[in-house]
Every structure is written in structure tokens, then in C-alpha cells.
Amino acid sequence: MRTKQGFAGAIGHTPLIRLACLSAETGCDILAKAEFMNPGGSVKDRAALAIILDAERSGRLRPGGTVVEGTAGNTGIGLAHLCAARGYRCVIVIPDTQSEEKFAMLRTLGAEVRPVKAVPYADENNYQKVAGRLAQELPNAIWAQQFDNLANRQAHYQHTGPEIWHDCEGRIDAFTCATGTGGTLAGVARYLKEQRPATRIVLADPYGSALYSWIKHGELKSEGSSISEGIGNSRVTANLQDTPIDDALRIDDRTCVQMVYRLLREEGLYVGGSSGINVAAAVELARQMGPGHTIATLLCDRGATYAARLFNPEWLAQKNLL
Ligand code: PMP
């Protein structure tokens, strides 16, 4: 029998999809790894599993223990699934700006959801710091600490990167994606550069994030804002540190929304905003590099998570993005 062991066993080995219309338009192979097909619906299932396995192996997480995390949503959803399957209590601290669907999903999965005001990282009441304190206060609890826990990027170095390399049979010229914790970009970039140092690694960044200016000019400076969720950062996390990144692209909300709808209407793919940014960056990279190249990126999560926002014309009109 070729069965998978439970929820955890079903994570990963997602298909690498060639985007037909965008490939034809650019003359490049635009490949997108369908991370929305993970059982919890996003790329973050991988980090959640790696963090839990690491905590179990080290003995920090014991039977009946509690997993606490500060998350914009998808990591919390992955953790909540895994905690339910492994008998852990799950406590999620989440900024109140995240989509309603994420809150509802977390509660349905049995997580205790603690919404906090969205404040900058420097503030003591930032969701990540609240989660860290909570994990110290609760008995038998660990803080998943996805931003600085290197088990996160290790998941992508051990799995996501090799899966991409294997599925394109080593023919890859560039990889681009947006980052939140930095785990995906760091792990995939490291693995791909080791296989073929000439592979171009390009960060895709939304407005409101400081990482674009960090790559371009060496200083963490942000301008503007974005409707995208779960990506961008004001700091260089432990996961992102020392990642071999060649260049950065900044993608605005209008370009992101247009790409999300092109993916829906032309490719039949229903994905979230960060996927729109990733594919828009891949297409921009194809234009820069010229025809004949292979460029890979990720489709991070499902569009259904953003039904009331990105896929709601009234909401888009309010944001002047219709
Ligand atoms: N896209 C979405 C929708 C996410 O939730 C996240 C993680 N917050 C990312 C992209 C970025 O992934 P990473 O944390 O590995 O940088």
C-alpha cells in the first residue's frame, strides 16, 4: 500500500505546475509549486511540521503539551491541524487585521485564538512578543517561534528546494518568492544555489516591507503599504540571515490583484495575494531575462481564505483596486 501517515504524512510533494498562458506570453517556462495543495492549505504546513518534530525530538514538547505561536494565520492553521492530530493544546496569537476566514478556521480546528492589536515589531505588545511571553507563562508549553526558529528554513532546504530541483530535472535559471518569516526563500535558495550557483534568487516584496530596500540599498526602510497578508517584514529574521539573494523586485497591489485574477481566469488557479505577487515577480523576471529561461515560484495558499477580501468586488472597490 502506498499510504501517507496521517496529516503530517500528507504534507509536501506538491506538484510543480507550468503556467501555460504566462509561459506562452513570456517565452519562458513559468513554473509554480502548488503549495496550496498541502493538507492545511498552505506552504506553512511544512514549517509547522518541522517545528513540531524538532521540539518533539529535543524533548521540549512532551505528550499533552501546548504549542503557542504568533502568526498571521497560515502557520497557525498548520499547527492547529498537527496539534489536533497529536493531542497538543494550540494557542494562537494573531493580529486583528487578518482575514475573518483565518480566525474561523483556527477556531474550527480547536485552537485557542487570541487576537491582538496589530502593532510594529518594536512594540512590546507585538503579536510575536505576546506569544513568546504566553509560552513562558503556560505550563508545559513551547513557543514555535517560526520567525527565528531555524527548523522552519530547514524544512524548505530538506524538502521544498529538492522537490523543485527534482521536478524541473535541474533545468532552472531563477527562483523568486515573497517572504514572511524568510523560511521558504532561505531554504529553497540555499538548496538551489548549492546545486547550481548560477541560479538567480530574487526576492519579491510588497510595499510596506523593508526587505526590498535592504537587498537593493543595504538598509531596512519601508514605504507605502499593501493588502497582501503573511508577507513582507521590517527586520531580517534568523531564518532569512545569510540567504544568497541576487536581487529584489517590488510588486504593488494593483499588479498583485491583476495577477491573482489572471491566474483565476486564464490558468484556473484560485490562490491568495502572496501567490499573485510571486507569479507577477516571476513574469517580471522573465521579461528581464528574456525568452528561453525557466523560472520557478510558489503558489502559497488558497484563494478561498480571502473570499471576503481579494475576491469581493466591494472590498476591492474600497481599496481602489477594482
Ligand atoms: N504567503 C503566505 C500566504 C503566507 O502566510 C506566508 C507565511 N507567513 C508566506 C507567503 C511566506 O512564507 P515564509 O514565512 O516561509 O517566508
Image (tube, rainbow, N blue to C red):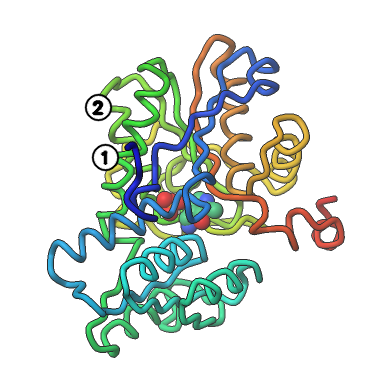
For mark 2, what is the residue? 194
Q: Is residue 187 above or below residue 92?
A: above
Q: Measured from the top left, where is residue 189 in percent x and y? A: 35, 35
Residue at 36 percent across and 38 percent down: it is: 160
Q: Measured from the top left, where is residue 321 in percent x and y? A: 81, 52
Residue at 49 percent across and 40 percent down: it is: 177
Q: Nearer the viewer, mark 1 or mark 2?
A: 1
Residue flagged by tag 2: what amino acid is it? Answer: Glu
Residue 189 is left or right of residue 285, and the answer is left
Foreground residue, 47 or 62? 62
Residue 289 is left or right of residue 62, and the answer is right
Residue flagged by tag 1: what amino acid is it? Answer: Gln
For mark 1, what is the residue? 158
Q: Residue furthest top?
A: 292
Kindly indicate whether the residue at mark 2 contacts the one at mark 1 (C-beta within 8 angstroms).
Answer: no
Q: Which of the 4 quarters of the picture holds residue 135?
A: bottom left
Badge 2 marks a residue whose secondary structure is: helix
Crowding at mark 1 (Cα within 10 Å: few <14, some 14-19, many 20+) = few
Residue 95, labelled with which disc?
A: none
Residue at 64 percent across and 42 percent down: it is: 276
Q: Residue furthest front?
A: 1
Q: Is residue 32 above or below residue 68?
A: above
Q: Measured from the top left, where is residue 97 in percent x and y? A: 62, 72
Foreground residue, 130 or 248? 130
Q: Which of the 4 quarters of the picture holds residue 267?
A: top right
Tell me if residue 166 can be seen. yes
Labels 1 and 2: the sequence-earlier one: 1
Tell me if residue 231 can be seen. no
